[in-house]
């Protein structure tokens, strides 16, 4: 049973089976139409992904459900694809089993809820590599066609860099062939860990690029497009580094925070400064070969673990949701002209430490917050997703959510 509590207090019910023990909200994303994509791995042999209808003022019915048979440890990311195959209809890509093995991903040409007869499956090639932990759909090959960007943060890099992490690019839907592979030379870098893969235009040349965090080595890399072939941090790209053991790069998002027409970067560093946590905002456009440090950005310190997750709120100007252990800080500019102090405009506290383990911003200025380890009702550890509509201000708790999704 799957219950959705709408803003107006009604409790619509839809016949979706998500068993106790699932981790509802393990991955969240909004599609371009504003609907919420949610995964619930771990309930049984099957993992479940659901598309929930959302508008600016309500979150309501489940529109579509997709069952990953035999993938109870679904465990990967979920992301909308605008239209990679050019047929005018949006798609979805879902990560499979990234937390427990080789991982993989499935591209669903008609989104969730349809028989995946034409689905394209990419399997991880490396034991415990975790392919699918982070996903993005963006053109990074420079041919104006959307590519699949899939990370395997525990895969070995070229040579002997154990668990350096690898980002793979697949191009030309629906056939999809491997077009590019990017890795680092630092063992245990965990390049492309969940939430640390951001398409953007680094240098403002109109060609799509990537920003990728490697929190195990406290690095963020800017990878310039067009991407092709196999390469690593030593032979191309920008590099920003944080203080040692800061986990700089645990989360990376891109947006034009200062409204100057160029993409900027926000980087989470949840162990910055004796584990207080911080977020650093770096102002674009960027030299595609720059080597810089976190000191070049605007830094906002936070509570324990701050910056473990980030989301960009679709407000004008964009605000930033900074996830911590059990809390979200909403910080807002003016970010222009940088550097100016950043002010927190809202703080939302949860009762569970896993509150804000995942976050996704809707297109209307609101925020969905995943709490995948929370108990809900009589279903222990089944997970909860809370949705906060636009206009977050002041000191709030998880009880102030405008809508809630529970198994
Ligand atoms: Ca399509
Ligand atoms: Ca492309
Ligand atoms: Ca570019
Ligand atoms: Ca900017």
Image: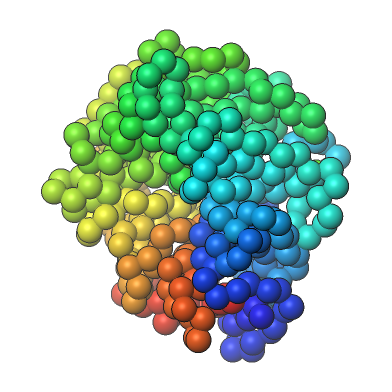
Image quadrant holding the N terminus, namely bottom right
- In this rendering, the answer to whether 69 lies above or below 156 is below
* Residue occupying image coordinates x 50% and y 86%: 378
* Residue occupying image coordinates x 76% and y 52%: 111
Nearer to me, 407 or 370? 407
- Residue 303, horizontal then vertical, whole percent: 22, 59
- Residue 307, horizontal then vertical, whole percent: 32, 51
Q: Is residue 368 visible?
A: no
- Residue 281, horizontal then vertical, whole percent: 33, 40
Q: Is residue 313 left or right of residue 233?
A: right
Q: Is residue 68 left or right of residue 288?
A: right
**How is the model colour-coded?**
rainbow
* Residue occupying image coordinates x 58% and y 67%: 43
Q: Is residue 115 visible?
A: yes
- Residue 334, horizontal then vertical, whole percent: 35, 50
* Residue occupying image coordinates x 48% and y 38%: 128
Q: Is residue 259 left or right of residue 11?
A: left
Nearer to me, 350 or 389? 350
Residue at the top extreme? 235
Q: Quadrant of residue 65?
A: bottom right
Q: Quadrant of residue 295?
A: top left
- In this rendering, the answer to whether 90 lies above or below 303 is above
Residue at the bottom extreme? 10
């Amino acid at each position: 049973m799957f219950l959705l509590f709408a803003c107006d207090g009604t409790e619509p019910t839809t016949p979706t089976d998500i068993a106790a023990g699932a981790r509802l909200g393990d991955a969240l994303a909004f599609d371009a139409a504003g609907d919420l994509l949610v995964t619930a791995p771990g309930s049984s042999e099957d993992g479940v992904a659901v598309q929930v209808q959302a508008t600016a003022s309500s979150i309501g019915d489940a529109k579509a459900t997709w069952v990953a048979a035999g993938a109870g440890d679904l465990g990967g990311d979920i992301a909308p694809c605008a239209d990679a195959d050019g047929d005018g209809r949006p798609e979805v890509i879902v990560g499979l089993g990234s937390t427990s093995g080789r991982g993989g991903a499935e591209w669903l040409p008609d989104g969730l809820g349809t028989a995946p007869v034409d689905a394209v499956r990419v399997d991880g090639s490396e034991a415990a590599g975790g392919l699918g932990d982070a996903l993005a759909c963006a053109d990074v090959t420079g041919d104006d066609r959307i590519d699949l960007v899939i990370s395997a943060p525990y895969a070995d890099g070229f040579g002997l860099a154990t668990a350096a992490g690898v980002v793979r690019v697949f191009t030309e839907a629906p056939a999809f062939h491997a077009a590019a592979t990017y890795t680092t030379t630092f063992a245990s870098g965990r390049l492309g860990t969940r939430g640390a893969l951001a398409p953007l235009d680094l240098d403002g040349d109109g060609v799509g690029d990537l920003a990728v965090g490697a929190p195990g080595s406290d690095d963020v890399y800017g990878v310039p497009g067009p991407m092709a072939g196999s390469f690593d941090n030593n032979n191309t790209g920008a590099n920003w580094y944080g203080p040692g053991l800061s986990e700089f790069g645990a989360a990376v998002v891109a947006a034009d925070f200062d409204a100057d027409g160029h993409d900027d970067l926000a980087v989470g560093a949840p162990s910055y400064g004796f584990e207080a946590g911080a977020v650093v905002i770096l102002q674009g456009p960027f030299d595609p070969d720059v080597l810089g440090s976190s000191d070049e950005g605007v830094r906002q310190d936070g509570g324990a673990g701050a910056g473990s997750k980030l989301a960009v709120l679709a407000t004008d100007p964009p605000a930033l949701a900074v996830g911590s252990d059990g809390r979200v800080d909403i910080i807002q500019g003016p970010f222009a002209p940088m550097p100016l102090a950043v002010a927190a405009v809202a703080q939302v506290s949860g009762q569970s430490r896993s509150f804000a383990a995942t976050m996704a911003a809707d297109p209307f200025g609101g925020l969905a917050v995943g709490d995948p380890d929370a108990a809900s009702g009589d279903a222990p550890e089944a997970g909860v997703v809370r949705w906060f509509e636009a206009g977050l201000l002041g000191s709030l708790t998880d009880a102030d959510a405008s809508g809630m999704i529970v198994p």
